[in-house]
Amino acid sequence: MTTTAVSHNDLIGASAADVRAAIRSGAYTGHTAGLAAGKLQCNLAILPEQYALDFLRFCLRNPKPCPIVGVGDSGDAKLPTLGRDIDIRTDVARYRVFRGGTLSEEVTDISDVWTADLVTVALGCSFTFENALVRHGIPVRHLETGRNVPMFKSNIDLVPAGRFGGQMVVTMRPIPAEQVDATREISRRYPQAHGAPIAVGDPATIGISDLSAPDWGDAVEIKDGEIPVYWACGVTPQNVLLEAALPICITHSPGHMLIADVAEDAETTILT
């Protein structure tokens, strides 16, 4: 049976469950920026149980790039605290599978590689607070242009735990100079989605040499009167997992998030 493809525009205004259904069926494989407004979006790290405790320690020691919003049971593909019908094997538009620290494959379904010892860790995503910025009249360039957010490696060291460590990945959004303070205050209200910015202005201060050449995502225009603003990014654990060279680990592809049923401004990330 052939699945009819849908576009990003087709899903604007759709519920979280409907977006996940489109992804699960294979009808949509694109990025999730701007979809299911008002719902929490999540980065993913899926790894063998024997490494999960150290990874959770790492996340707790580095809450800005790695805010934990959900943890699955060993071998269980469900995440009932984030959505009653979530199947982590099929409900993300694109996954990356790493073996021994090397990208093995990029796929739209991980059912074939799922095993009984895998643990899913869901982490908050900056896509969540973007909806709040838009509501307050603050432009978000990659949403305006239908692109993925630009992401960069930085020189900011992380606090290690076991075999996990490295440097932070950041996202960048150009913000009008007169709205930077408001942007900082709005995003601060979402600590489970990376919270307030970690830097503003000159990219060289955090080890970025060229804002027109992101390591992931798409370059965006910085207009006159705008200042680049940087947030901790949930791609950070992908780099960390890569360096740890685990026998196997699985992440979302950058920009292709798990969309939860939990409200983005909920007091906790436990679905009730």
Image: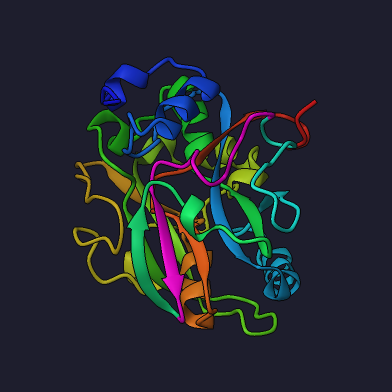
Q: Position of residue 48 (x, y in %)?
A: 64, 69
Q: Is residue 220 above or below residue 101?
A: above
Q: Is residue 245 above or below residue 139?
A: below
Q: Is residue 65 visible?
A: no
- Residue at image position (50%, 62%) is 250
Q: Is residue 146 above or below residue 59?
A: above
Horizontal side of 258 relative to 53 (left or right) equals: left
Horizontal side of 32 relative to 183 (left or right) equals: left
- Residue at image position (53%, 50%) is 43
- Residue at image position (54%, 43%) is 184
Q: Position of residue 77 (x, y in %)?
A: 64, 47
Quadrant in which the C terminus appears? top right
In this view, the residue in front, 252 or 247, is 247
Quarter holding residue 17: top right
In this view, the residue in front, 235 or 83, is 83
Asked if the stretch drawn in magenta spans residue 67, the answer is no
Quarter holding residue 155: bottom left
Quadrant in which the N terminus appears? top left
Provide the residue span drawn in magenta: 84-100
Q: Position of residue 185 (x, y in %)?
A: 59, 38
In this view, the residue in front, 44 or 249, is 249
Horizontal side of 209 relative to 55 (left or right) equals: left
